[in-house]
Image: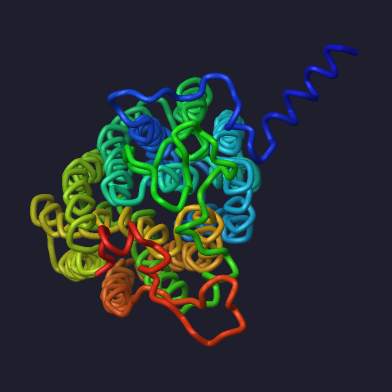
Amino acid sequence: MQARQHVWNLTIKLFSRNRFESEPGTPKRGKIFYGWWIVGAAALTNGTGGALQWQGFTVLFLPVSESLGLGLGATALAFGLARAENGVIGPISGWAIDRYGVRPLMLAGTIVVGIGYLLLSQADNFIAFLMIYILVISIGASTSFMQATTAGINSWFIRKRGMAMSINAAAFRLGGAAMVPILSIFVLKYGWQAASVGIGLMMLFFVAPMALAFRRSPEAYGMNPDGDPDAPADGRASASGGQTSPIATYDSWTTREALRTQAFWVLSAGTTLRIAAHGTIFVHIIAILDWKDVDRQTAANMVGLLALVAAPLILLAGYYGDRIGRIKILSLGYAMSAGSLFLVVFMEGTVPLFLALLLFTGSEAGSSLNWALVGDLFGRKSFATIRGMMAPLYNSVLMVGPVAAGFIFDWTGTYTPVLVSGGVLMLAAAVVFLRLKPPVRAPRGLADQSQCVPDTAEHPHEGSTTPVD
């Protein structure tokens, strides 16, 4: 009976809203701000688990198709349906991350992903593959990688948000640079089923423990965002750790407030256009190179090398985004990516194709800034929920895009329409981001009045030190 009561008390503690404020193992002040340890844990999570989950699918794409006797359109359907599912549960998982914190959701999700890959290795038909990938792996992934880690980072940084997000994104690409070629060798030698077992074990025994490093916010421990030594005058944190709210609300919009702004919908539109192009091309990238007569191992090596090149560009984008604003950098990167896709249509040979695809790293460089903008515009407290509200939009195009691209190739034998369409979408994303402006809102407590104030008045740190444009 005592053991049962002990388990119940631990459960209540784990899921209570303010559980981190009194938990053992509270991070201590030191020479290194604890937020950077969270960035490190996020980087390791996405550099291994995230890279295998999202970039590894490109390596498994053709072997699964051939092993199960499927067309490329049918194989892409698994990826597309997984994105549709994430679109439905994205707002829910975002709310859960904001409500319960990153750590429990990320830990549980990563364990589910690991178990899913172990089960996937036993799939011997399309229906089994589809059910396991969609109902197990995809659900676990919705709270395991980028959505969870960006929420964790956003809670700890304001002025240095762009750089922190970019380190996380660069690690994802560096992980891809290492993981994609290694996974390709493993798949070619042992088969995709054995590779799935390896991925599952890594998720369970290496990636899942990374979740334990995450904490809700600096205010809960008497610290300030970015590690600033002085507590702001509004009393959002105190040196004694007397903060009663896990995350201060001085810089935060509620989800309802955000949804009523033009900025949310412009940001959502630009994000959706960018992800529609980037996600579709990335799922098919090895198949596109195979269509261009590049052998598969060389294609996998090219993808890994592109990720390696993208990593320093992502860091540079984060560094300059914190100083000169993010929007122009984003738009330039997406315009470069559009040019890349147009060039690939005409290029032949490994070296010319690689040089053309180098421009596509502009989309990679802009990805972290894209999510940093959510925090810039709407603050920290509801970040995951607001980002999750975008999920139905961008995941709907991720459901359609890769599947449509696969069927187009099955019917026409060419990827030219896919590449041209992707270039047009990237150009459209660049234009839409140039139209993004900070939102305005009525002062709280005066919602019935028509007066509105600039976002910078409610976001003193963000508006003055982290220019949006």
**Does residue 332 lie above or below 145 as drawn?**
below
From this view, report whether residue 31 is shown above or below residue 370: above
Q: Nearer the viewer, residue 48 or 298?
A: 48
Point 40% across, 65% down: residue: 377
Task: Please indicate whether residue 449 sits to the left or right of residue 2 in the image.
Answer: left
For the point 31% across and 73% down, the residue is 433
Q: Residue 33: percent from the left, percent from the top?
A: 33, 31
Image point (86%, 12%), residue name: 2
Q: Residue furthest right?
A: 1
Where residue 395 sits in the image (x, y, percent)?
Answer: 51, 62
Count of numbered tags = 0
Which residue is farthest bottom?
A: 450
Quarter of image, res 119: top right
Between 389 and 417, the residue placed more toward the observer is: 389
Q: In which quadrant will I find the C terminus? A: bottom left
Residue 99 in the image: x percent, y percent?
Answer: 63, 47
